[in-house]
């Protein structure tokens, strides 16, 4: 389980670095989005959702 969490954090950090978004902000966005997330979503779809959240945040700043 720890390995899965570590890998998810690495993926998130990669997306954050690519888009110049603070990791803490991304974690907060994900925490908020879990209330609206779908349980049976693939890794690709989840990565796309993360990217959409980041893009939305960038456009609003």
Image (cartoon, grey):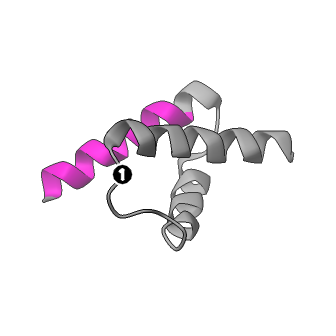
- Residue depicted at x 55% and y 64%: 33
Rendered residue at 15%/57% (across/down)? 2
- Considering only vertical position in the picture, is 31 above or below 54? below
Instruction: Say left or right for 45 vs 56.
Output: left
Q: Residue furthest bottom?
A: 35
Relative horizontal placement of residue 5, taking residue 60 as reference (left or right): left
Dot 1 crowding, Cα within 10 Å, few <14, some 14–19, many 20+: few
Location of the N terminus by quadrant is: bottom left
- What residue did someone put label 1 on? 41
Q: Taken as a whole, is the magenta stretch helix, strand or loop? A: helix
Residue 43, position in %: x, y? 33, 41
- Residue 57, position in %: x, y? 75, 47
Magenta stretch: give its range: 2-16
Q: Quadrant of residue 5?
A: bottom left
Q: Residue at x 43, y 41 (%)?
A: 45
Q: Secondary structure at mark 1?
A: loop
User: Would you place residue 31 above or below residue 53 in this image?
Assistant: below
* Left or right, 24 with reference to 42: right
Viewer-proximal residue among 16 and 57: 57
Residue drawn at the location 43% of the way across and 46% of the way down: 46
Q: Please say whether residue 15 is one of the residues in the magenta stretch.
A: yes
- Dividing the image into 4 quarters, which one contains the C terminus? top right
């Amino acid at each position: 389980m720890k390995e899965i969490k570590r890998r998810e954090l690495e993926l998130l950090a990669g997306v954050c670095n690519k888009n110049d978004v603070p990791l803490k902000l991304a974690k907060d966005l994900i925490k908020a989005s879990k209330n609206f997330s779908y349980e049976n979503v693939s890794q690709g779809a989840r990565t796309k959702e993360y990217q959409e959240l980041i893009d939305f945040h960038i456009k609003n700043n």
